[in-house]
Image: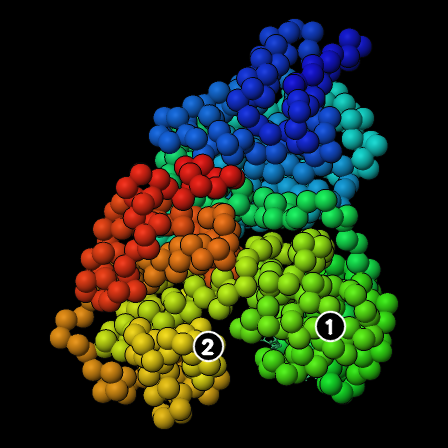
Amino acid sequence: MIEVSLDPNTGIATLTWDVAGLPVNVKNRAAIAAFVDAVDAVINDDNVKGVIVASAKKDFISGGDLDELRAARTPDAALELVKAIGACLRRLETCAKPVVAAINGSAIGGGLEVALACHHRIAADNEATRIGLPEVTLGLMPGAGGTQRLARLIGIAQAAPLMLEGKLLKVRDAAALGIIDEVVPAADLLGAAKAWLLAAPNATQPWDRDGYAVPGNDPQSMKGRLFFMGAWPKLRRKTSPDDPAAGAILQALHHGVERGIDAGLKIEARLFAGVASSNVARNKINTLFYGVNSARRLKARPAGIPSFKPKRVGVIGAGLMGGGIAHTAARAGLEVVLIDATQERADAGLAAIRKNLAKALERGHVTEKDMVSILARIESAADFGRLAGVDAIIEAVVEREDVKADVTRRAMAAAPGVLFASNTSTLPITTLANLSPVPGNFVGMHFFAPVDRMPLLEIVRGEPTSDAAVAKALDLCKILGKTPIVVRDGRGFYTSRVVGAYTREALLLLAEGVPPQVVDNVAINAGMPIGPLAMADQTSLDLLLDIIGSLAGESKKQEPFVRALHVLDRLSSHLERRGRKVNAGIYDYAPNGDKTAWAGLAKEFPATSSLPGETDIENRLLHIQALESIRAMDEGIFEDPADADVASVLGWSFPSSRGGVLSHVDGVGTAEFVRQCDELAVRYGDRFRPPQSLREMAEKGLRFCDRTGNAHG
Ligand code: NAI
């Protein structure tokens, strides 16, 4: 696991990480125990004059074992996971022998913490290497000295954003910040490490030297105090109140760095223990790591179908979505034929992509060379004949069945038999597939806007859709870098159906006279990035009238649809308040984008005698999403509860601190959730009546995480 070799001529010992049976050096219990033994052996061996920490894998060392972490339910259990490595790293950096990290590939999380405890860090010049402490993205924080050493090495103001945002740096950027001391060609890495050890026999850490001061500003100085005075409110604005990780990192910096390193390390460990044993961390690990990874590994791919390797794809419709899809495909290395009804419109679509890329170039997200080659891969055309020879086609034309049917037929004539995907947001895939000359090749690929940034892709299987088409759509999804869920056809598929129910509930609250800021703030306090009514204005109220109307189907004339549709109809058709696009919707918008609730709402939707309290509002907004998801699962739209969790977090930013819509039920407790919904049903309507399947789960004491393969409670 940790190979120790000693060069008798120089006295240099090399500790090489090679965790057995895994592609990366995960810092699990066994690896840590082996490393601690190896460190103690070299410290105690008088023949050893210097130490190299290296890796035999492609990457350096990764973070802790997430399975071990999510099983740690108490602060003591979490502390147990970092105690030994924390103490060992302190012994290593104070052992009076020089220690160097030879960073051959990525050093992330716990891996970087090991490197930070070395006196010197040399990295191989490798484009693919990433350096950082991204624990916060999984609801965690560094627990083996990362916060304390990084801040003492490069200063609090530089270290804080890296840890609070979980940024990963390229080697040269990490070197520019002072995290890496030297960058050398990969072949010279060990040689450079040896040379440094021989040249620095008396190395110590800066923070163990007399007269050490934190670079930049000490937390106690005026500048330091000003930094924290600004950092706390900023953090509160940026992070969900129920997510403790970022706050704990800032606390470790605030209170840890003003003390000596040993006290700072203790403070960090205590904060880590609380954060790592929290439900939030477990929820995030379950959904953002296990759920997302198994989706990305294409767990839903039908077996036995050869891998699909498209080179050239057609995209029909060069509007907002088609342009985004073409851009994403070209960025992923595919050749793209971008078709619209006229050459002018197709060219306009390509021009919009060019503009988008120019912005990305300005922000440093793409290089000029990449931009040129991405654009060179896209051909704009009006002639469907240009589709000859493509391997797959995705249509994103206007949302009309007749137009979609027409382009499907014309595309299939030009490229017979290839995969044909529709990005429709509301039309049934089964109906569209049956209008295609090759129904088996027809599948739904429902992207989210903006396509180049939104990670989720909802793949919809219509009745005639073949297994091969689903497999191909999944392979294409992987190439496009998206995370898929595969669902069956049904009104609103999965995602639009649940977002529809959520928006509808917010509109009902508005109809009851609850001020929109109250509804939106409750949602934001619950962890949503934006309130549902502000979101409704962004979508535009006339479009929502169509979407919610189409989701209602035959139930249009029944509650709860009647009241929600009335609100939309009243605002958009009668009062011309169509939303953000006309600066007038549920809110009024000032030219600078500031919004205030429209003053006419109280007259239009007078308050009912008793307004619901905040807990009721929160439960109504969140529980309705879970109930709609359970109904969709009961109808066979999807099977694995993890799909709902992943889709809700990636698709519409359901708070990842709760793990997603169905983990939310687990968090409340199944029986308690049923009880709360029964109560809501009495007060607000039958839409809150829990489905029978949920009552049965509650009776048996089952949770959704018991029903999924990749997450356990
Ligand atoms: P859009 O109006 O921006 O683009 C539609 C494009 O289709 C236009 O460029 C239009 O010229 C072109 N078009 C119309 N008839 C055509 C024909 N016969 N042949 C070739 N091109 C034709 O609309 P958007 O927003 O891009 O939506 C496209 C599709 O994506 C719709 O089905 C929509 O429901 C769906 N969708 C939209 C989302 C959104 O957030 N806007 C999200 C997910 C799906």
Q: Position of residue 185 (x, y in %)?
A: 82, 37
Residue 689 vertical placement versus 697 (above, below) = below
Q: Secondary structure at mark 1?
A: loop
Dot placed on the residue nearer the N-terminal end, 1 or 2: 1
Q: Nearer the viewer, residue 592 or 558?
A: 558
Residue drawn at point x = 14 percent, y = 71 percent: 610
In which quarter of the view is residue 407 placed?
bottom right
**Label for residue 643?**
none
Mark whose residue sits in front, 1 or 2: 1
**Label 1 crowd bin: few (<14), some (14–19), many (20+), radius 10 Å:** some
Of the residues shown, which amino acid type is indicated by label 2?
Answer: Ser
Q: Secondary structure at mark 2?
A: helix
In which quarter of the view is residue 78 placed?
top left
* Number of numbered discs visible in the structure rendering: 2
Q: Nearer the viewer, residue 328 or 162?
A: 328
Q: Position of residue 285 (x, y in %)?
A: 48, 41
Q: Position of residue 626 (x, y in %)?
A: 38, 56
> Which quarter of the image is occupied by the N terminus?
top right
Of the residues shown, which amino acid type is indicated by label 1?
Answer: Pro
Residue 439 in view, yes or no: yes
Q: Which residue is mark 2?
A: 550
**Which colour assignment does the render follow?**
rainbow
Q: Nearer the viewer, residue 144 or 516?
A: 516
Residue 668 in view, yes or no: no
Q: Position of residue 204 (x, y in %)?
A: 60, 24
Q: Which residue is mark 1?
A: 437
Residue drawn at point x = 27 percent, y = 84 percent: 601
Residue 10 vertical placement versus 520 (above, below) = above
> Which quarter of the image is occupied by the C terminus?
top left
Residue drawn at point x = 72 percent, y = 29 percent: 57
Q: Quadrant of ligand 1?
A: bottom right
